[in-house]
Amino acid sequence: MLTLLLSASVSGQTPSAVRTPVAAHPQTDYLSLETVTEQFVRKNLAVEAARLEVDVAAAERVGARLNPRPGLTVSAENLRVSGETPASRLHEYGLLVAQPIELGNRKTLRMEVADRTVSVSEARLTEVLRRQLFDLKRSYYESVLGRVLLGIEQENRDNFEGLVKFNTVRFEEGFIAEGDLLKVRLERTKFDFAVANAELAFRKAKIRLLELIGDPDFERAARVEVSNQLQVPVISLALAQLRETALANRPEVKVALAEVALAESSIKLERSRGKGEVTPYVGYKRVGVDNTVLAGVTVPLPFGDRNQSAIARAQAQQKVAETNLRLVRNRALAEVETAYRAYEAAREQVRAYEAGLLRQADESREIQLGAYQEGAAELITLIEAQKTRTEIRANYYRAIFDYYTSIFQLELATGTDIKL
């Protein structure tokens, strides 16, 4: 009877059948990765701020398409102070309208600069979005990992509860001393602490997840449950293809390319500004008792300031943008390499656990359990076997989490989604 009681209470489970903690709250709120991603796009404050930066850049288009304002000049000349000439023959009144005309196709170049400024802001929005999505996915699977680890600790506690019952019966029947029973109960308390710590870690992970999706109701973490499972994704990735994808699609590379294009347009615009404006004018003039019409044009002379400083600054900014593009491309390749090696290492680690470590840990615990039932092993030996099995199972799921994280890092490094 004692053997059956202990075996039923401490029976082993495979990693795929780790018990998921069931929330006691009657209004459990299940969140999938797709659901939190949708909420994230709508509510994340960092993404919203980057989106508003695009609107600010788009406002530059309004001024870029407008022409210079015309000018109106009203004048009065030769107003007599003293002298013999009649005032009607001296005074002159004028009304002059002048319209500057920009040279060097400046309006078109202004609109080009405005468009490319918007392109830079849009590329930066994409960069912010992908970085925040990486944090979101990682935080989501941190919550999934927290749920799994909590399930492992709860299973350990329940298993050890079986040992407590088993030894209680043995003590009542006189097979063990009271001190041995107290040792078992003391170890049972340690498992309670482990469950409490796992619950706290799980709660923190869910709070972080709510923060990322822009939900200020952090009390909701008590009733939120993540619905995805921590299973090994089966994918095949080629490093050469990932490198090409990173250079073509990575948001930082697109930002750098857009900044180079913006610098080129800025140089053209500054050179056009150095050509000045032609200002034709037409007006009315009354000289004494006579009415006259005047017309003319003001043209810039090729002397003095021809916007050399702004041109030089734009050229320097172009060199900075080109250097930054090379830097970003090199960094993209380095991060792809790092993430890919992390992906390979995590994949091999998962395979190692599945190839034998998990099975060996289960067998070791079962052997020690049988020996303890027969009185051939000490309690400390069984506890060590149980702890080893728990550690290996927890590390197995952490390796799966690292596997997911490496894939998310590859998504971030390449700027594309990897289908899991």
Image: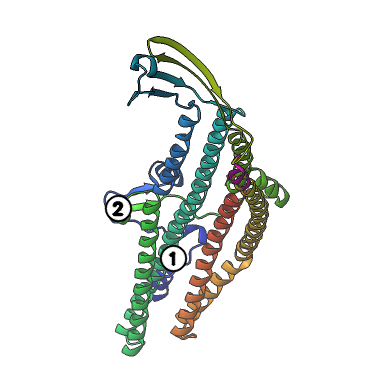
The kind of residue tagged 2 is Arg
* Residue wearing tag 1: 152
The main secondary structure of the magenta stretch is helix
Where does the image place residue 37, in percent across and percent down from the top left? 44, 44
The kind of residue tagged 1 is Ile
User: Is residue 317 part of the magenta span, yes or no?
Assistant: no
Mark 2 and 1 residues: CB-CB less than 8 Å, in contact? no
Residue at left offset 53%, top offset 67%: 395
Numbered-mark total = 2
Mark 2–mark 1 Cα distance, whole angstroms, equals: 24 Å
Where does the image place residue 162, in percent across and percent down from the top left? 37, 72
Q: Is residue 419 left or right of residue 63?
A: right
* Residue wearing tag 2: 220
- Secondary element under disc 2, as helix, strand or loop, is helix
Which stretch is magenta? 306-312
Q: Quadrant of residue 88?
A: top left
- Secondary element under disc 1, as helix, strand or loop, is helix
Q: Which quadrant is the N terminus positioned in?
A: bottom left
Q: Which mark is residue 49?
A: none
In this orientation, which residue lies closer to the viewer: 289 or 35? Answer: 289
Residue at left offset 44%, top offset 37%: 55
Given this view, does label 2 or label 1 mark the residue nearer the observer?
A: 2
